[in-house]
Amino acid sequence: HVSKRGTTGAVLGRMDEGDGHRGWDLWLQGDRVGMHLINSYPQDALKVVAKAPLQPGKWRHVTVAYDGSGKAAGVKIYY
């Protein structure tokens, strides 16, 4: 859970720095969940950040779904 407002940082991810950062990550950006899907950063990557912030002090389940479209609109972040 987010313990205080303004929380930013990595939650989890898997990237290969030697291969253009190919992979993915999930992070917090100012209390909002964000995700990258990367083939080669920055020229072939998706970045999506949720509109709604997480509330401090409350546990939430977070799920991310991707439809394989190659478009940011194909990534959905659910709380």
Image (tube, rainbow, N blue to C red):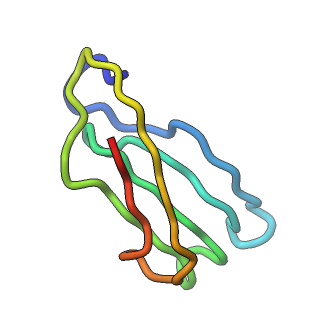
Left or right of 4: which side holds 48? right
Left or right of 24: which side holds 50? left
Q: Give percent across and percent down for residue 54.
A: 25, 34
Q: Quadrant of residue 60?
A: top left
* Near-viewer residue (76 or 6): 76
Placement of 26 over or under 4, stated as above or below: below
Q: Give percent across and percent down for residue 53.
A: 21, 41
Q: Give percent across and percent down for residue 7.
A: 30, 31
Q: Give percent across and percent down for residue 24.
A: 61, 58
Left or right of 16: which side holds 51? left
Left or right of 70: which side holds 16? right
Q: In this view, which residue lies farthest toward the right?
A: 18
Q: Residue at x 50, y 40 (%)?
A: 10
Q: Quadrant of residue 31?
A: top left
* Near-viewer residue (72 or 21): 72
The N terminus lies in quadrant: top left
Q: Residue at x 56, y 52 (%)?
A: 25
Placement of 51 over or under 74, stated as above or below: above
The C terminus lies in quadrant: top left
The total number of labels drawn is: 0
Q: Residue at x 53, y 83 (%)?
A: 70
Q: Residue at x 59, y 74 (%)?
A: 41
Q: Quadrant of residue 8?
A: top left
